[in-house]
Amino acid sequence: MVIVFAVVIGVLYGAAINLMIRRSLVKLLIGLVLLSHATNLLIFTAAGLTQGNAPVIDPDAVSLSGAVADPLPQALILTSIVISLGVTAFALALSARMYKATGSDDLDRINMVNK
Amino acid sequence: MSLIDLLIISPLIIPLFTGIVCMLGIAIRPTSRKIQHALSFTGSAIILITSIFLLSKVITSGIQVVQIGSWPMPFGITLVADQFSTIMVLISAIIGLTGVIYSLASINPEREKFGYYPVLFFLLLGINGAFLTGDLFNLYVWFEVMLMSSFVLMGIGQSPIQTSGSIKYVTINLFSSAIFLTALGILYGLIGTLNMADLAVKFSQVRGNPSVNGIITLVSALFLICFGIKAAVFPLFFWLPDSYYNPPPAISAIFAGLLTKVGVYALIRTFTLIFPLNQSPLQTIVIWIAGLTMIIGVLGAVAQNEVRRILSFHIISQIGYMVMGLAIFSPLALAGSVFYIFHHVMVKTNLFFISGVIERMGGTGELKKLGGFYNHLPYLAIFFIISAFSLAGLPPLSGFFAKLILLQSGIFVQSFWLVTVALFVSFLTLYSMTKIWAQVFWKPTSLDIDDKGENIQHKIKYTSPSNLQLWLTPIFLLSMITLLMGIGSGILFPFASFTGEELFNPTNYIEAVFRSGQ
């Protein structure tokens, strides 16, 4: 299972970087979204995949042991999803404004207009 | 919750509260600027007062730790106020107050209506949070708070054409956040905790174990890259000059003073506490980064002909000095870094403030179109000289002592070429400061050569803003701090050197966190 996740994460990272180095603003944004997905999946995988276990431990236990789901990575991912939602919305608004001003989503051309 | 706990969280609570009240103020009375002004001035003054109290508390009775929500140590959110982080909080409070005063003078009503002041306070909240947190994931969250506010500050009231600088800034920062988060994920998978003190202890147990050495190096390299982007070190600095050039001077001054320093803080904190640099294979790389950042930044500045662009490139080269202290990694060098950060933030923010006055009065920041400023506003010229010479490191100003400590520590560990580079760079810094001085202040009229090789005289008409006193107040304050830091460096040095010791040997930090977490 970990192998599958690793491959998926790798493909997502690769696709994200590939999109980000394009000149198109929209592709850049999609690249950023994919990048955050890849990162979230990586946290999820790196913290250990467990199946069918509840995130509950004995009251006496000091730390997680045995087959228990760890709730913390999911809390981390949840936080980072919320943050990336806000940031992506901002980036979308910014690029919409840019498109209105320049009539182009080509980053090179936008830079030319700026000079 | 005791009074001390309250004092530790006050650099977070007060900006949050002020920001919210300012927002309500806009919602209730959108036209009244006075409410905004009064609230933001009071808020930033209170932050400064509480951060001075906090620093004196930390100096007298050691590291203060608070566990938010009283959760035991590795699970809850830890805030740690050691000397380094409280000094950084004090820096951000000083820049907050002077920045607010400068904004009162210079920010146009349009921006204020869009919520300039609330966002400014959220920015301060994010910065202070990043300094005080004792948990790596929290550091990520505070980074995002800070970044969101800085995106908005950069974006509001800007003409759409200017947004291309913002796009670059937003993209590079999102990219670095993704790297940060990746590193956090791997780290959690490896160690199972994200509390900095806990990480430090657990790492010292597994270090030397060959099966994890490779992955530890990988994670620390990821941290180096993501904090390096935020701190704008070579070769990750390219976003900085463009993004600091466009926004109004008040905003770019605050950014120039504080934002990159949060990156430097994070670098120093992680590479002293969690991955001590002297036990990591990355030390050679960091030494090279420090040297190249200094050189490339200053060479970039030499090629520029616009006040704020020159200053932006100098930020990069100065970051190199701070990283140099980290790279050498001795108590003295770390003390030098801390001293340098304090000095640099005051001076650099001041220079941006001054460039704002020049741009406002001359209508441009281009060197060739300016001139004769000395005759027009002699005391501004004096403030400029104080800051510029301090930046270049001339005695008896603060920059001289900051550089002296760093160079001395470099000589002690015999990295002579780094010392040579640092000296050479401060010479070039002096060159480009005198360039600004000669072009803007000294030469009697503007001098420009057109395409045909003939001289053009631009008409320079300086129009003083009606509230010039208010523009000059923060400049005066920061110049005084620079002067006093230079004169009183003998008094300040013991504090810096204690901070250096504490960073070099973080057992105090770890013990304080564990003690409070019981």
Image (tube, coloured by chain):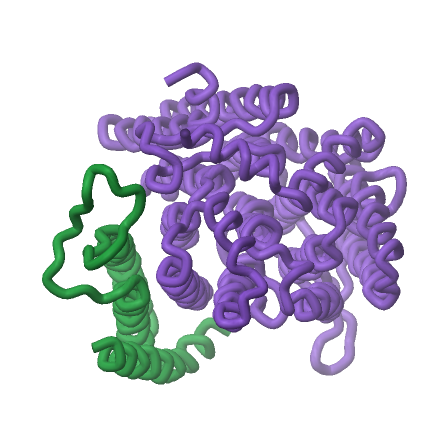
Chain colours: A green, B purple
Looking at the image, the residue that sits furthest to the top is B3
In the picture, measured across the screen, residue B401 lies left or right of residue B250, that is right
Tell me where residue B374 appears, x and y as whole percent: 80, 43
Q: In which quarter of the image is the C terminus of chain B?
A: top left
Residue depicted at x 37% and y 27%: B18
Q: Nearer the viewer, residue A44 or B442?
A: A44
Residue B87 picture quarter: top right
Q: Which of B375 and B406 is in front in this view?
A: B406
Residue depicted at x 53% and y 32%: B512
Tell me where residue B290 appears, x and y as whole percent: 70, 63
In the picture, measured across the screen, residue B57 lies left or right of residue B186, that is right
Tell me where residue B55 appears, x and y as whole percent: 60, 25
Residue depicted at x 83% and y 42%: B401
Tell me where residue A108 appears, x and y as whole percent: 43, 81
Q: Is residue B449 visible?
A: yes
Residue depicted at x 54% and y 48%: B262
Q: Is residue B458 visible?
A: no
Label total for image: 0
In the picture, measured across the screen, residue B96 lies left or right of residue B507, that is left
Looking at the image, the residue that sits furthest to the left is A52
Q: Relative to B336, is B430 above or below?
A: below
Q: Relative to B37, is B153 above or below?
A: below
Q: Relative to B33, is B257 above or below?
A: below
Q: In which quarter of the image is the N terminus of chain B?
A: top left
In the picture, measured across the screen, residue B506 lies left or right of residue B443, that is left
